[in-house]
Amino acid sequence: MSVADEIKARLDIVAYIQQTVPLKKAGRTYKAPCPFHNERTPSFVVNPERQSWRCFGACAEGGDIFSFAMKQHGWSFREALENLGELAGVEVRQQTPQQREHTEKIDRLRGLVKLAADLYHKWLFDSNDPQAVAALNYARTKRGLSDETLQSFQIGFAPPGWSHLLDALTALGYSPDELVEAGVATRNEQGNTYDRFRNRLMIPIRDERGRTVGFGARALDPEERAKYLNSPQSQVFDKGRLLFGLDRAAQTIRNSETVVIVEGYLDVIQAHQAGYTDVVAQMGTALTETQLKLVAPRWANTIILALDSDAAGQTATRRSLEVARDVLQADYSGKLSIDMRVLAVPGAKDPDDLIRETPDAWPALVTAAIPVADYVIRQETAALPPNASLPQREAAARRVLPLLLASENDLYRQDNLQKLALKLRIGEDDLLRWANDQRQPPTSAAGPRIAEPPAPPPDLDDPPDLPPEAYGVGEDALFGDPPLHIVINERPETVLEAACLRGLLRRPERVYQVNRTFRELAGESLALADGPLRDLCADDFERDTIFHALMLMFERALGQDARAPLDYLRDQLDGQTVALIERLLAPTDDEQMRQQLGGGFPPDLQALLQRSARYAVDDQAGLQHQALRLRKARLERERRELIALQLEQPSEPSAPPNDPAGDQADVLPDYQSQIALSILATGLIDAELKRQGNATSVR
C-alpha cells in the first residue's frame, strides 16, 4: 500500500470535510453548499463509498481527500500529503537518522518558540505586575486593540528584566544554547546569555500553517532607539519567506482572489480587528520574491500595495513593484496574470492609524487603489521641473517603462501611452521604441510556438501491448526511498493518462493548442466553455494519484515565468520525483526502434506502430487526440455520478424553513441539465475525433 493509500485508509473523507463544511445525509451521499463558491443550491456532494467529493455547480471539480485539502488550503500535493499524513499518523517520508535528528531539532525549536509565546501572553495579563498592567493599558488605549484581538493574535509582554524568559524556559528543560538558536535569547562577547526581548509588546509571527516561528516586538519605552525588533534569522524564522497574518488571511484571499499587502504587524492586526481579513504584512522595507509567491499567482490575481505614505514607504512601494515586475511579469503562456495596484493612504498616515481612527474609510481606499501604471507615472514625473529638458524627460520615461512592461495591457493600451506622452511631451512612437529597447530577453525557454495544422492520425483499434515501464511509474516514488520500478495498472484510461502527460512534459507549449481545441468546440457557449469543455487540468487525471499530482505541478509550472516549465519542475521537486519525470520523458520502445533503424520499417512493423498511434506524443495532433479521449473518459465518469445522484434526488422538494417566499425552483441541483450538457460535449468530442479519423473511444 502506498503512503497516499494508507493515509486515505485512515482518514474518512466525510469526517474530514465535515470539520469545515455542514454536510447533510442525502441517500447514500452527503450534500452541502459548495465551500469554494457562493451558492444557494447544495451542489457539493461527498460520496463515502468512493471516498470522493465533487461540486456539480460553478466549480465543476472533484477528487479525493487530497484534492479537497489542496483546494481548501492552497497546498501543493506534497504539503497535503505531509499535513494529512501527520493527521493520520502516517510517516510520509522515510528519513535517514541524520534527517530525523534534524527534523526533531527543528520541531523542538518550534515548540520552544510556541512556549515562549504562551509565556509572553500569560505575562501580559498578570494583574499583579504593575509593568504588565501598564503594557496591557498601552495595547488597549494607545494601540486600540480589543481584548478579543489580544487573545486572537496572542499578543504578549516581555518584562524589562534580563532573564525572565531564560529562567522560565531553562526550568522547563531547554538549554541556553537552544534559546539563542531559537532567537529568544542572545549572548554577548563575554559569553553571558540573556533575554533578547525586554520591556516590549510581543507579537507572535506565524507561518502560513499557523505555527509560531518568531516575534515582532514593539518597544514600550518611548526613549528606546529601536522601536521595533524582530526575531533574528534562524532555522525556524526567515522573515523574507513569511507574510505576517497569512495564516489568518488565506481563506479570504482565496475567496476574493485579492490580497492587500501592508508594511507592519499592527497594520494587519488593526485591519483584521475591523473585519478586513485580506490584509497581510511584508515585515520589511520591500517585498521579496518568496513573499510574493506565497500569494500570487497561487491564490490572488489582484495585489494591492498599501505601504506607508512617507518617503520611506514610497521607496518601499517602488522596490516592491520592481520585485513584482520581475516575479509576476507574465505566465508561460505570455498572458499577464496579476493586476497590481497601489493604495494611497492619505494624510501621511499608516494603515494602522487610519483604520483605528476611521475604520469605515478603508473599503473606499481599497476600491480607489490605482493601477501600477498611473502610480509610477505620477511618482516618476512629480519631481520634473516645468521646463525639463528632453534628456530629463527621456530619463523619466525610461524609469517608468520597465514597470509598464509588466502589463501588456498597461503598455499597449492607448490611454496609458497617451498619459505618459502628454505628461512628458514625448511622442508615443518614441515611447514604444524606448520600451522595445528595454525589453529583456526571456530567461527561460521560448514561449509557446504556433502549432502547424495537425495531420489526421491513422485509424485506431485496441491499445498496443506495450510494457508499463513505457508510460512512467507509480506514486510511491514521490516520497521516501522505495524503488523506482513501480508497475502502474494497464487499463486504457491509465495508459492514456501517462501518455498524455508524457506529451505535455515533452512540449509544454502544446497545452495551449489543446485548450484552443476545447474552446473551438465550445463555440460561443459559455456553459460548455466553463464546464465540460474547459481547459485541460488535473481533474482530467483522476485515475492515478501520481498523474493528478504531476498535472497540478505542471499547471503551476505554466503559471510562472522564472524558468522553463521542466526546469521549474526539476527545481521544485525532489530527486525521486524528478526521476519519475525523466522516466516519462524517456523514449518509448517504438521511438528507440526508430532511432536504431533510422526511421525505416518493414510494412508489418509499420502497421503495428500505426496501431499504437493513439498514444503518439511527438506531434500536436497526437496530443490533441489524447486530450480529447481523456476528457471524454472524464465526462463519462462524471455523467454516471450525475445519473446516480439524480436517481437519489426526491421528486418533490419540501420548502426549507428559512425560505419565507417558498420559491423552490433552485433548491435542488438541476442534474438533468448538467447531464444534457455533458452529453452535448461528448458528442462534440466524438465529432472532432471522427473528423480526425479516430472515432474509437476509450473503453
Image (spheres, rainbow, N blue to C red):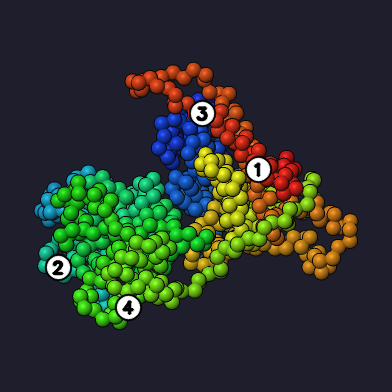
Callout 2: helix, strand or loop?
loop
User: Quadrant where the C terminus lies?
Assistant: top right
The residue under label 3 is: 670
Q: Quadrant of residue 21?
A: top left
> How many circles with numbers are drawn on the protein?
4
Q: Amino acid at mark 2?
A: Glu
Disc sitting over residue 394 in the figure: 4
Q: Is residue 316 among the parts visible in the rendering?
A: no
Callout 4: helix, strand or loop?
helix
The residue under label 2 is: 224
Residue at 68% across, 50% down:
626
Q: Quadrant of residue 377?
A: bottom left
Q: Nearer the viewer, mark 3 or mark 1?
A: 1
Q: Where 455 sits versus 654, above or below?
A: below
Question: Residue 58, how many percent across, how many down?
Answer: 47, 39
Pointer 2 local density, CA inside 10 Å: few below 14, some 14–19, many at least 20: few
Pointer 4 local density, CA inside 10 Å: few below 14, some 14–19, many at least 20: some
Q: Earlier in the sequence, mark 2 or mark 1?
A: 2
Q: Earlier in the sequence, mark 3 or mark 4?
A: 4
Q: Amino acid at mark 1?
A: Ile
Callout 3: helix, strand or loop?
loop
Question: Residue 224, how many percent across, how many down?
Answer: 14, 68
Q: Nearer the viewer, mark 3 or mark 4?
A: 4
